[in-house]
Amino acid sequence: MKAQNRLLELAHYNLWCDRRLYKACAEIPKETLHEDLKLYFRSIFGILNHNAIVAELWYSRIKGKPFARAHIHEEVGIGLVELAEVCERMDKVLCDYIKNTTKEKLAKVVEYQSTEGKKHAMDRESILFHLFNHQTHHRGQITAALEILGYDFEPLDYIAYLYEESRQG
């Protein structure tokens, strides 16, 4: 399978996972979403916020544009609904970007500065793969927290996505 097709599949999988995860989180009291559970970004909401912001950050780097937020720890919304809207928009932007780009553009190296101020360079394909892997990592932290707290959620496994896609296609 071509790299572009695989990236597009990962982008759609990312969107599918985020929709399922936000659906599960919508059933949880606000206090629980914001509770300090000693997670990497303290709370479930903190991790969701981090994933949304980091997607924006990497997309701005891919496009060669300045990052629109003051810093990567800025809260993107006052609540879960607003955060879900930001995440959904960003997931769709990434799907559209990959769908409408070329393999040559994906191979192009992007120079950027890390949040710590260090200069780096990486091709767009690797950046996107990193972004999707990074988001999967943090969704795993959230689902572990949901499990410990006793909340139900639909599986986010890639194979579950493939099974669902094959039934719909």
Image: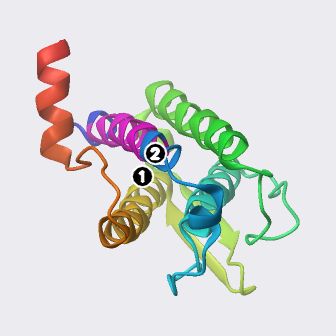
Callout 1 environment at 10 Å: few (<14), some (14 to 19), or many (20+)?
Answer: many
Q: Quadrant of residue 169?
A: top left
Using the image, determine if residue 30 lies above or below residue 121: above
- Residue 27 position, x and y percent, is 49, 45
Query: Does label 2 or label 1 sit earlier along the sequence?
Result: 2
Badge 2 amino acid: Leu
Q: Which residues are magenta?
A: 6-22
Q: Which residue is mark 2?
A: 106
Main SS class of the magenta portion in the image: helix
Callout 2 environment at 10 Å: few (<14), some (14 to 19), or many (20+)?
Answer: many
Between 157 and 108, which is closer to the camera in this rendering? 157
Please identify the quadrant where the N terminus is shown: top left
Magenta stretch contains residue 115: no
Image side of residue 96 versus residue 9, left or right: right
- For image coordinates 60% across by 74% down, the residue present is 35
Say the numbered circle drawn on residue 142: none
- For image coordinates 49% across by 50% down, the residue present is 25
- Residue 42 position, x and y percent, is 59, 80
Q: Secondary structure at mark 2?
A: helix
- For image coordinates 51% across by 66% down, the residue present is 122
Say the numbered circle drawn on residue 125: 1
> Can residue 45 be seen here?
no
Image side of residue 143 versus residue 55, left or right: left
Between 131 and 121, which is closer to the camera in this rendering? 131
Using the image, determine if residue 100 lies above or below residue 46: above
Badge 1 amino acid: Glu
Q: Secondary structure at mark 1?
A: helix
Using the image, determine if residue 27 lies above or below residue 51: above
Magenta stretch contains residue 11: yes
Question: Number of numbered discs present?
Answer: 2
Confirm or deny contact between disc 2 and disc 1 (CB under 8 A): yes
